[in-house]
Amino acid sequence: MKPKPLSKDFYSFLIFFSSVSCIIALIQSVALVVIGSQMIGLQSFDSWMWLVLCVIAVTNVAFIRYLAHVGYRWTAYACAASSLAVFFQYTLILDRELRVFYQEHYHAVASILFGSALLWGLSLTFTKASEKRWLRLSGSLTIIIAISLATLFFLYFQTGEGSTKLLIDKTSRWVSLFGVLPSVCLIIHFYQENEQLSPTGHARAHTFPALLKLAAFVGLLFFGFRFSVEAVGYSMPYKPSANDLRRSKLVDAYHFVDKSGDSLHYRLLKPVDYDSTRQYPLIVCLHHGGAHGKDNMQQLSADPAPFLMELPTRTKYPAFIFMPQSPKGLGFSGAYGSASVDSLVFRTIRQLVGRLPIDRKRIYVMGISGGGYGSWHFISMHPELFAAAIPICGGGDPKYGPQLVNVPIWAFHGARDRLAPVSHSRDMINAIRRAGGKPKYTEYEFAGHGIWDKVGEEEIMEWMFAQHKE
């Protein structure tokens, strides 16, 4: 028996939410192209993601109902699997504790996403659903995009070259932008089917679907506007403030270029009352994620640089302060296989040690957030180089714990940090302690990610300058 056709109201509902989902996907893809993974750090990100989850849930439930009604059973199963995979990923990103699992099992989660998307595309292309031209085209586009992204993902983690990683990452962002095309095909399909239905007269509107539409529309206007404005603001060219310009006049700007042509911008501040016949400590100051670029200036205003540059601090603790700037798309740690500028930093350090009166027994590293991860990474890669480290809101690979037993470390973290999970610091500290080391660790119970003001009140300089290699 042929099933009764779905109502025009249902098609209207499905077209509306499919359109909202398409607009959401476009906004998010454009943000990804413009600022990349940095959008996770936007203040509006969590509220935006809850809107995304709700709209996806309503849209996919309606779509699965449609597929089941018209007899596309296997396609409905594939749609459900793909929806669950997306929900799984977004849940991991939104939850502070689960985000740790997501970061540690990123490859597995990505494989599930690519696999479920490919299954969804195949179900539209090679099952009964392929009888409908726009469904078949949507499936074909989904297959092409899923395979392309999976290939780029594989290549990204196979290459160790920073510039190549940046190119692959940029390419994958643009490919993701075309991910809205399959949704457009679905909207066209639903619109055509809706046009083929006979008018049913003025049926009474159902309250609940109408409320869902209103909520989605208002949510898109409010949260979409906030998210878009913040993303655009984040992507705007850096405009130095009066304080930035003042600081920049105090610190010499340099540009290191290695034999392969890769370059690193950095600033170097000499000790107060510099005496070339004396030896001074070297402080490697690693900025957070908000200071990436090529202007060679933003890192001067990124904690902990302003603290180290204060005259009372420099007078009491004279040292060379080395402040490298990581380009956008790169980091100091290469965490989870991401592109890193670490090798350039180490080469620059070796160059500085060779031409300046630096005490090789007193080279220190400190940084916050991305710089905190970089601090852990630096001492893990070259524990013989550093006399002490102060990683703040960071983390590393616990397998390096035994190598850090003899490195003086004072780590800091906020227990309620949503950007850098506190477990990342805890795991490193516990790994070192299990190996017999005695690192210092301060955790602020009620603090989040912004803990520098608290850290700056600690006796970190006194502790750090008391450390030296034998």
Image (tube, rainbow, N blue to C red):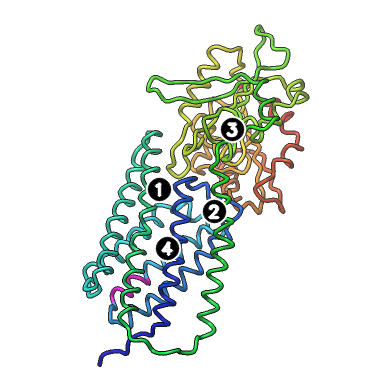
Q: Residues within 10 Å of mark 1 (few under 14, many from 20)?
A: many
At mark 4, the secondary structure is helix
Give the magenta-colored segment's residue range: 74-80
Q: Choose mark 1 or mark 3, whichever is in front.
A: 1
Give whichever of discs 1 and 3 has the lower sequence position: 1
What is the CA distance from the residue labelled 1 to the residue labelled 2? 17 Å
| Residue 431 drawn above or below residue 342 | below
Mark 1 in CB contact with mark 2 (< 8 angstroms): no
At mark 2, the secondary structure is helix
Q: Is residue 77 magenta?
A: yes
* Left or right relative to 72: residue 229: right
Q: Choose mark 1 or mark 2, whichever is in front.
A: 2
Amino acid type indicated by mark 3: Leu
Q: Choose mark 2 or mark 3, whichever is in front.
A: 2
Q: Residue at x 67, y 49 (%)?
A: 414
Q: Residue at x 21, y 73 (%)?
A: 131
Q: Position of residue 294 (x, y in %)?
A: 52, 30
Give whichever of discs 2 and 3 has the lower sequence position: 2
Amino acid type indicated by mark 4: Cys
| Residue 181 drawn above or below residue 70 | above
Please give the residue where the numbered disc 3 appears in the rendered image. Answer: 286
